[in-house]
Amino acid sequence: MIEIKNLSKTFTLHNQGGVIIPVMQGAELTVAPGKCVALTGASGAGKSTLMRMIYGNYLSAGGSILVGGVDVVTAEPREIMALRREVLGYVSQFLRVVPRVPTLDVVADPLLAVGVDSDTARDRARDLLARLNIPERLWSLSPTSFSGGEQQRVNIARGFAHTYPAMLLDEPTASLDAVNRETVLSLIEEAKAGGAAIIGIFHDEAARDRVCDREIDVSVYTPNVTKGAA
Amino acid sequence: MTPLLKVENISKFYGRRIGCKDVNFDLYPGEVMGIVGESGSGKSTLLNCLAGHLNPEIGEVLFEMRDGAMRDTVTMSEPERRMLSRTDWAFVHQHARDGLRMNVSAGGNVGERLMAVGARHYGNIRENAIDWLGRVEISDTRVDDRPSQFSGGMQQRLQIARNLVTGPRLVFMDEPTGGLDVSVQARLLDLVRGLVREMGLSAIIVTHDLAVVRLLADRLMVMKDGHVVETGLTDQVLDDPQHAYTQLLVSSVLQV
């Protein structure tokens, strides 16, 4: 489902003396449907960078990232938009929404985007919000005013609303209490059982051991930082 | 899928000064593209060339007509272009008063667009106008008031209703949230986003506000001194800018 070959990435900081920072070289990773792979490595090893490259936020310097047959490295913006809408989900650590939109609509939005009718989408959203213990009286309010933990759970509900065949999870259980952590882990297990290929970053070791089938240490793909003025 | 709009080598000069130069892109149905850059970067010049308000010296703007044929809107006759701007295109100005008739009622402003495309039944026009005012959250008790009696945010919403009532396929927006309070901006962004999805609109939005494009635009084009310096998926351009100018632009935004 997800197949990464010989992937590399450099950052060029034009406004800081043209410093070129190679951050990844020769990365290889394959995730089959129904499997979950954890990215590990010290802070700064490039876990989030790799994840953002897969999602298309970061431009790759070379190599290929096939997700459901689409090469993210060379795809047109509209192909990536379609991929994100239908195939590739991403639960980031931060919720980014249009202000004023009610929580229920924020969560139902990914379903509406793939053409699910409004009633079905909202039923699914209600179900997820209830499972993640967001009090019903908050559903009609915008999540922008919620606490950090509540925003994170809304973000997770939104990320799991549509059943994506491929998912990226950035610290989905960080700072959750035991009950909600358990809910998130079962959501991940359900997604795997449904055939989703998942790549995740988990600092929570117990969670990682429970849902992940394999670990990849990203630091083996991180070249030694060399600097050169351009 | 075929593009709705194909822009090829558009260049516009003001005497020896460059307005915009060698601009190329395709816009597909349902896509929203943002154009950002500082004042004087040529973004409004480009938008006005695309919308037929300015005549570019070089290049073609091919638009897919309802029969599927691609027509160059730069070289088509003025009446044809005017018809397109009433039926298939919409233009939302930064200052609502540039896009509204200030001495005509709110209902009249919306109804006038309908009459321009042939609607004649007064009852239907009024009903349609009230429906659209509702969609942009203007109460039906204000239908007979003039826009001059409206707040800035209401005027902007009225301008959007006037533009969208005829069911256009392509919307041009020039700084649609410029000069509005942030709370009013948020409401307008929410509204525009909903309408774009609901009506399957394609849109080109010129703004200098990176937060606006992050929320509204799928794709981004960055301009400087009349040239396009970078294009790509909106969050990719904002999160991993490649060009020196874009890096400067993104790093200059104040964090709230």
Image (tube, coloured by chain):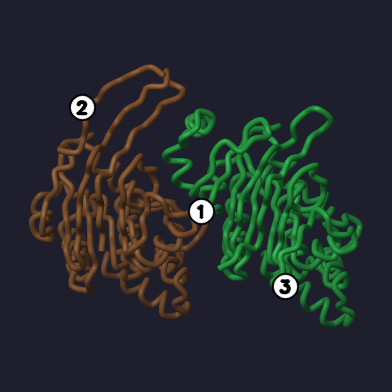
Chain colours: A brown, B green
Which residue occupies 63% across, 55% down?
B188
Disc 1 from disc 3: Cα separation: 36 Å
Q: Which residue is mark 1?
A: A99
Q: Which residue is mark 2?
A: A224
Q: How many C-alpha atoms fall within 10 Å of the one at disc 1: few (<14), some, or many (≥20)?
A: some
Secondary structure at numbered mark 1: loop
Residue B250 x/y as whole percent: 50, 34
Q: Which residue is mark 3?
A: B66
Where, by quadrant of the figure, is residue B195 drawn? bottom right
Task: Specify the quadrant that holds the N terminus of chain B.
Answer: bottom right
Q: What kind of residue is marked 2? A: Asn
Between tags 1 and 3, which lies in front?
3
Disc 2 from disc 3: Cα separation: 57 Å
Q: Is residue B139 visible?
A: no
On screen, residue A225 versus residue A18, left or right, reads: left
Residue B43 x/y as whole percent: 68, 40
How many labels sit on residues?
3
Q: What kind of residue is marked 3? A: Arg
